[in-house]
Amino acid sequence: MDGSAPAPDPRPGSSPPELHGEALTARIDEILSAQAKHFASGRTLPREAREEALRALLHAFETKEKLIFDALHADLHKCATEAYFTEAGFTTAEIKHALRNLGRWMKPETSLSPLAVAPSRSFVHHQPLGLNLIIAPWNYPVQLAFAPLVGALAAGNVAVLKPSELAPASSAACAEIAREAFPEELVAVLEGGIETSQALLQRRWDHIFFTGGTSVGRIVAKAGAEHLARVTLELGGKSPTIVTASADLDVAARRIAWAKGVNAGQTCVAPDYVLVEAAVHDGLVSRLKAAFVDFYGQDPQRSPDYGRIVNERHFQRLVRLLDPDKVAHGGEHDEADRYLAPTLMTEVTMDDAVMADEIFGPILPILRVDSLDEAIATIGQRPNPLALYLFTTERADENKVIERVSFGGGCINNAITHLGDPKLPFGGIGTSGAGAYHGHYSFEVFSHRKAVMKSANFLDPAIKYPPYEGKLGIFRRLIG
Ligand code: NAD
């Protein structure tokens, strides 16, 4: 997590000056009263209104694609292709998926009620939660603000987005997209840093959807508890990758190197470290080196496809994790450019600094294990990972890891690609988060499942009413 105050940023597209003190309070009052009124009017409820909002967002994304690409390049040196598949394209795919499925999602789920309450029918009605606060981090600053919003709008809500101050150009782009697509009473973007976030968190929300680090997640959970708001936490952690002796090493190395290289490793589900069976350790390391060179050339600093570290503080934090004796590949860095090469560290132990916290950068430590069981035991001693990747060709290994290891979600013989399937819930467990979204799960996370039983009037047997004397046996037969 990042607790530093926002520094003035010279990059293009930087946000306008943020509000403080009374001006901030007044602005929040203004937005919240407009949104509360709008939600209470019921105008967000009809399917047509939801579809109109989703189409407006889709249109804004399509017309403002260049703004999004420029902002992501300014903040993180993301190339257009990566900006498309991880942010703009990812979000528009979520919008289109919601538009295609909204009618089905909104249908009440009906069932026949039990005999004891006959004649009745039961159904679940999806009710929007109301006022939603969506707080986003800096690493996928556009996608992580708007992908949750897709669920909020599909479910018939109003929302306030608070983008990250650490990606200022993207934060300004988020504000512009929302202004273009929505009236403020439906969706408002409030830019700013920790003061803004904390001022928002003091208010009463029906739902707080937070994406960010585990320590700020605790602050958010406490703020939500104050008003008993629903809280969804999309957090981080150290996501392990296991490579067994049976793995296809060529494929494994390319997929791991790719997943680590995306956004220069600043991805919540990036492979944080590798546990590799000793027999294939050297083979994996040599293939990982080759894959990094294939993808980004001999000098990745000159590759248009390789990102930069978001700011000076994170750059310094990452450089401190490098142990020169253990760097097997990469390690080159340039402070002025916030550049850190894709780096492999070998002979790493659990006592090394790089294994203490989530790395969140392009450093990949490789640790030898003697067996899959040792890998499972090692992971089990640490907090629940957000993601886990297993490379193996043995079905028994897959079953063992899936059944025995607790993690948010993951892949077998791949890495980070599980996020690309809108039919899969995306979320953590324990310290890596609570709640999940994407596709239908986004609709669910922004809805209350209201349980309703509807009974017919034509039959009302006296047997169910007092006096109960002599009726216990009948109740036993009906209920038990
Ligand atoms: P962060 O927790 O520092 O900040 C996230 C948001 O919280 C920002 O908008 C920030 O302004 C706000 N914030 C920061 N400090 C705050 C405080 N004291 N009180 C209230 N609000 C505060 O996270 P980050 O550095 O922006 O992002 C990196 C973290 O996010 C990593 O741990 C990463 O794993 C995690 N992450 C998780 C996911 C996911 O989907 N699970 C996705 C991306 C990032």
Image (spheres, rainbow, N blue to C red):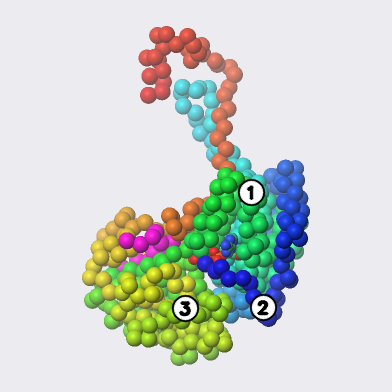
The kind of secondary structure element at disc 1 is loop
Nearer the observer, 329 or 452: 329
Q: CA distance from mark 2 to mark 3?
A: 21 Å
Residue under circle 3? 318
Q: Which residues make up the magenta segment?
A: 381-395
Residue under circle 2? 9
Image coordinates of residue 80 in percent, x first then y, are: 60, 77
CB under 8 Å between callouts 1 and 3? no
Q: Amino acid at mark 2?
A: Asp
Q: CA distance from mark 1 to mark 2?
A: 31 Å
How many marks are shown on the rendered structure? 3
Residue under circle 1? 205
Image point 50% across, 80% down: which residue? Answer: 316
Q: Amino acid at mark 3?
A: Leu
| Circle nearer the N terminus (1, 2) | 2
Image point 72% across, 61% down: which residue? Answer: 21
Image coordinates of residue 272 in percent, x first then y, are: 41, 71
Nearer the observer, 355 or 462: 355
Q: Is residue 407 left or right of residue 197?
A: left
> Which corner quadrant holds the C terminus?
top left
The kind of secondary structure element at disc 2 is loop
Q: 10 Å neighbourhood of mark 2: few (<14), some, or many (≥20)?
A: some
The kind of secondary structure element at disc 3 is helix
Question: Magenta: predominant secondary structure element?
Answer: loop
Where residue 448 sits, quadrant-wise, is: top right
Where residue 312 sits, quadrant-wise, is: bottom right
